[in-house]
Image (cartoon, helix red, strand yellow):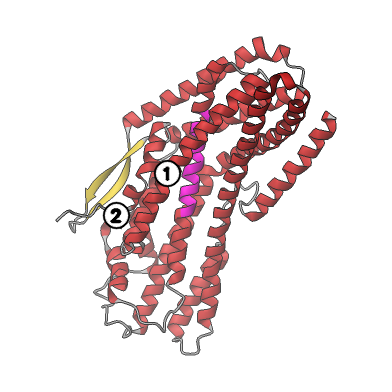
């Protein structure tokens, strides 16, 4: 009989790992370790060859950007009379280089490789949270494949946008420079995919935690799920981070609190179940903080570059449409530039919408925890010990709200999307007024 493929976080993230490794954003590899109990676990470890590949990518990006900058200063910029085109080209080149080189340098110099540490920690939690949900892993693999397709489509659109708008229409680039620009934007695209994946993974795990409360403690649960919690947190291979939580909240093992039949749990067992959920919630909060710390500045630069690109693409699209009507001798040239300007602006809007919506969904799901805990406190049959534990959990959720920020400059949620749209419309109107 054919064995089913392994279902774990590492296997589901294989597509993202391969993309990250391709552009130098994954200087690590995963290995399988065996715990003293005989259970096998996967974890990320630093890779010497991966780090060398990242350094090589830094050299390529830096050298390519320097060559493009010198060529434009000498041959391209002296012949450009439109200030809008000149300033936009300089701004996008500078921000794109800063974003790509920052992402690569962080992979080389960051202490203990926070990305690998976050993924390893999430995978340990998934052994308990997601193990019974085989459909979850299947959907995750399909979603990863769709992101690989997005990466390819992103690269194709970017190439034709650069060639038709900047090389043919405005003449600021030589065709031989486009491959270097593609490499830079490939690094940027994968950085954004990494961030999006981590945020989406956290959303799913907060949802599973909240599902534990929807009928607690009146609904019967299966003993296997509760036992998996106890076995997981008593396992030494759960990592030092989990062990610290065990010391903080007390030993969580099945010998002290035996598992009974479904619907026959003691008050102390329910109390320990809430302890475990508080541990997981606290760890997820640590992961959110790590994501903000690692990707905050990159998101600031990404939002800045997307804002400049969307605004100028819409502006160029409108001006090119006017030229398309006036200049009948170059209709094909203007038409292709118009089409790819609108396409690239749509890509930027779609990317901004996905990132802000996903971050907002995680914040809403985390806030729902406090609402569910408050509803549990209204149950008249709650034991005082369980009520005290719920109050502690509610205090933890209130004091430490989950939110994603861009280096604390602004919070990433639906309000960011509204501000982004308003700023694009405002600056587009100003540019059109100066143009006329």
Does 53 appear in magenta? no
* Residue 146 seen in the current view: yes
N-term mark: 2 or 1: 2
Q: Position of residue 428 (x, y in %)?
A: 76, 38
**Which residues make up the magenta segment?**
184-200
* Residue 90 seen in the current view: no
Residue placed under numbered mark 2 in the picture? 7
Does 192 appear in magenta? yes
Nearer-the-camera pick, 425 or 330:
330
Q: On the rendered structure, is 2 left or right of 327?
A: left
Q: Where is residue 41 in the image (x, y as percent from the top left)?
A: 26, 52
Mark in front: 2 vs 1? 2
Dominant secondary structure, magenta: helix
Quadrant of residue 331 within the rendered picture: top right
Q: On the rendered structure, is 292 left or right of 261?
A: right
- Alpha-carbon distance for marks 2 and 1? 21 Å
Extreme residue in the top direction: 74
Nearer-the-camera pick, 254 or 98:
98
- Quarter of the figure that contains the N terminus: bottom left
SS for dot 1: helix
Residue 245, above or below 194: below
Q: Which mark is residue 345?
A: none
Residue 24, above or below 202: above
Residue placed under numbered mark 1 in the picture? 115
Q: On the rendered structure, is 102 left or right of 14?
A: right
Q: Give the residue at x 41% y 84%.
A: 218
């Amino acid at each position: 009989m054919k064995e089913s493929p392994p279902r774990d976080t590492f296997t589901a993230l294989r597509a993202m790992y391969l993309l990250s490794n391709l552009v130098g954003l994954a200087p690590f590899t995963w290995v399988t370790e065996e715990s003293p109990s005989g259970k096998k676990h996967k974890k990320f470890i630093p890779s010497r060859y991966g780090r060398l590949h990242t350094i090589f990518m830094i050299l390529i990006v830096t050298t390519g950007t320097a060559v493009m900058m010198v060529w434009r200063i000498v041959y391209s910029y002296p012949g450009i009379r439109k200030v809008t085109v000149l300033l936009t080209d300089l701004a996008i080149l500078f921000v794109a280089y800063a974003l790509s080189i920052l992402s690569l340098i962080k992979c080389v110099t960051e202490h203990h490789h926070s990305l690998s540490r976050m993924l390893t920690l999430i995978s340990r939690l998934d052994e308990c949270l997601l193990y019974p949900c085989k459909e979850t892993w299947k959907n995750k693999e399909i979603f990863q494949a769709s992101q690989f397709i997005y990466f390819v489509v992103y690269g194709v659109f970017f190439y034709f946008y650069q060639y038709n708008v900047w090389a043919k229409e405005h003449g600021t680039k030589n065709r031989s420079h486009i491959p270097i620009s593609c490499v830079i934007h490939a690094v940027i695209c994968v950085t954004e995919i990494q961030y999006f994946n981590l945020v989406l993974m956290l959303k799913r795990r907060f949802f599973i935690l909240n599902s534990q409360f929807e009928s607690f403690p009146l609904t019967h649960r299966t003993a296997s799920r509760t036992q998996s919690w106890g076995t997981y947190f008593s396992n030494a291979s759960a990592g030092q981070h989990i062990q610290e939580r065990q010391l903080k909240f007390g030993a969580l093992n099945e010998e002290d609190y035996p598992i009974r039949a479904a619907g026959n749990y003691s008050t102390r067992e329910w109390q320990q179940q809430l302890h475990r959920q508080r541990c997981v919630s606290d760890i997820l909060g640590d992961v959110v903080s790590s994501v903000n710390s690692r990707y905050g500045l990159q998101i600031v630069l990404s939002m800045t570059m997307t804002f400049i690109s969307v605004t100028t693409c819409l502006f160029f699209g409108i001006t090119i449409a006017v030229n398309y009507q006036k200049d009948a001798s170059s209709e094909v040239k203007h038409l292709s530039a118009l089409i790819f300007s609108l396409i690239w602006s749509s890509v930027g809007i779609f990317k901004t919408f996905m990132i802000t919506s996903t971050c907002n969904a995680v914040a809403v799901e985390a806030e729902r925890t406090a609402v569910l805990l408050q509803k549990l406190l209204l149950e008249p049959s709650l034991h005082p010990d369980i009520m005290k534990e719920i109050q502690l959990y509610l205090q933890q959720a209130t004091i430490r709200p989950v939110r994603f920020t861009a280096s604390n400059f602004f919070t990433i949620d639906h309000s960011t999307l509204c501000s982004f749209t308003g700023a694009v419309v405002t600056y587009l109107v100003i540019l059109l007024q100066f143009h006329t």
